[in-house]
Amino acid sequence: MLTLSDLERAAVEKIQSRLPVGITPYFMSLLSKDDPNDALRRTVVPTAAEFTQTPGEADDPLGEDGQSPVPGLVHRYPDRVLLLVLDFCSTYCRYCTRSRVVGHGAIYPSRSRLERAIDYIRSATSVRDVLISGGDPLTLNDERLNWLLSRLREIPHVEIIRIGTKIPAVLPQRITPNLVRVLRRYHPLWMSLHFTHPAECTPEAYRACERLANAGIPLGSQTVLLKGINDSVETMKALCHHLLRMRVRPYYIYQCDPITGSSHFRTSVEKGLEIIRGLRGFTTGYAVPTYVIDAPGGGGKIPLMPNYIEGREGDELLLRNYCDQVYRYPDVGRG
Ligand SMILES: *Cc1c(COP(=O)(O)O)cnc(C)c1O
């Protein structure tokens, strides 16, 4: 049992219609029992700051509802769709970008709704990549997952299927031999995992990722940049080093979306750039994710990079390396 601080208690009592509180017993065991500032604890235990709305924040900052041709399907990019199978998670992240729908029973994995989504994908022949998310798709049972994956695989233009999940971090016991047997039938199947902090990289999480990787599933991780939780070069580097050892490629660092009640989680963009600057060159290139802002209004993910271009001198490009030294590159053939 956790001893709640006054601010945490006030939030739990007020939560009601908002994003529910849910924490697996396993994840609960990783939280500090008495420190409300513990990194993992802050990601899942609500606090009163969630009820503060700051200018620029919105319930649907990414405009997903406006890019949804059928319920629970977001079609933003020409060649890929985001399929929200259900709105349930085993553990609810307090910074959830989809807190407007998640945990409310609004997106139900009924066969009829999923059939409509599948019909849409079948008719949209430009869609070559289906990203299954939610909620957490791995909270479906093996049979339903098998049904969904098999239906998607019947569509000839669907080249790859991706599953977005936080299960390996919050409920690694769900990665059973049987689940893995189901998943590996539907290759090429990729997975985007959601790891936030090195403290999530437990022996159980390692084991779960090992099973997935051994099934030939390429694994990536998406991490939200969170103030006071992972907003330092040391913490991100430790996380990315764990991920490589778990055979998970750090894929994206997301600038925290301006979701209602998120100001206590959001850092400046400069902080994200500082983290990329502190990784590139200082560690394995595979350990360096792409830092992105998911543009408010539905513009999609926009990559941000520290500026390594110093300027030009004639045909020479002046470049700054990771150690802050300037090098020249003969950039011939322009114009
Ligand atoms: C993030 C996202 C995708 C996938 O983007 P990738 O950069 O290909 O990983 C697709 N659709 C929506 C709506 C998204 O938010």
Image (cartoon, rainbow, N blue to C red):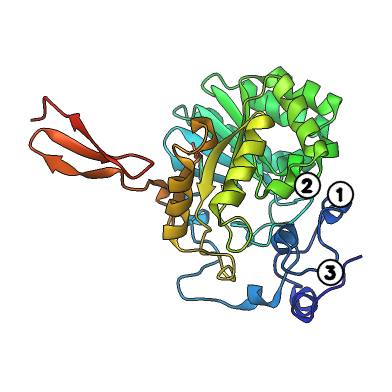
Relative depth, front residue between 139 and 277 = 277
Amino acid tagged 3: Asp
Residue type, mark 1 in image: Tyr
Q: Looking at the image, is mark 3 or mark 2 earlier in the sequence?
A: 3
* Callout 1 touching callout 2 (CB < 8 Å): yes
Query: What residue sits right under mark 2 in the picture?
Result: 170
Q: Is mark 3 within 8 Å of ligand 1?
A: no
- Report how far apart the C-alphas of labels 3 and 1 lie in the structure: 17 Å
Q: Is residue 123 above or below residue 181?
A: below
Residue placed under numbered mark 3 in the picture? 34
User: Residue 3's x, y, as percent?
Assistant: 87, 72
Residue at image location 74% in from the left, 73% down from the top: 15
Q: CA distance from mark 1 to mark 2?
A: 7 Å
Within-10-Å neighbours for mark 3: few <14, some 14–19, many 20+: few
Q: Secondary structure at mark 2?
A: helix
Rendered location of residue 202, percent (x, y): 79, 41
Apparent side of residue 43 relative to residue 69 in the rendered image (left or right): right
The spot of residue 214 in percent (x, y) is 73, 20
Task: Find out whether the residues at labels 3 and 1 contact each other: C-beta distance under 8 Å.
Answer: no
Q: Is residue 21 above or below residue 308?
A: below
- Give the CA distance from mark 3 to mark 2: 20 Å
The residue tagged 1 is 26
Left or right? Give the position of 163 relative to 144: left
| Residue under the image location 92 percent in, 65 percent down | 1
Is residue 335 visible in this depiction of the protein?
Answer: yes
Q: Amino acid at mark 2?
A: Val
Work out whether mark 1 precedes mark 2 in sequence or the reverse, and give the earlier one: 1
